[in-house]
Amino acid sequence: MTTEPWVSVEDLTKHLGGVRDSVCRWIDGRGRPARKIGRLWKFKLTAVDEWVRTGGADAQD
């Protein structure tokens, strides 16, 4: 059984094809699927993909 690695903000930005500033804004709120390990935020790509599919990354009013 292989476990999914945790990825950095930079890796997540590449995966999503987005902008680092957007990822950093997600970290600040919106129930993001992330964990803080020391001073760094880490993500599981499958959790982020599901979060995006269910509308978690949508802009809020």
Image (cartoon, rainbow, N blue to C red):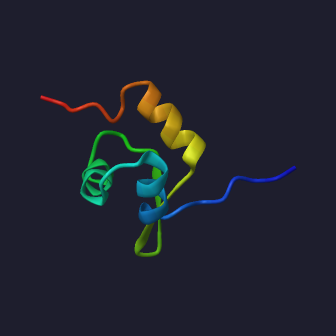
**Above/below status of 56 relative to 20:** above
Q: Position of residue 1 (x, y in %)?
A: 87, 49
Residue furthest left in the image: 61
**Above/below status of 15 relative to 53:** below
**Above/below status of 3 relative to 31:** below
Residue furthest front in the image: 17
Q: Position of residue 4 (x, y in %)?
A: 69, 53
State left or right for residue 8 relative to residue 23: right
Residue furthest bottom in the image: 39
State left or right for residue 20 relative to residue 12: left
Residue furthest top in the image: 54
Front in this rendered view, residue 16 or 34? 16
Q: Position of residue 56 (x, y in %)?
A: 36, 32
The residue under the point 55% across, 61% down is 7
Front in this rendered view, residue 53 or 41? 53
Give the number of callouts. 0
The residue under the point 46% across, 52% down is 34
Position of the C terminus by quadrant: top left
The residue under the point 34% across, 49% down is 18
The residue under the point 59% across, 41% down is 46
**Above/below status of 40 relative to 17:** below
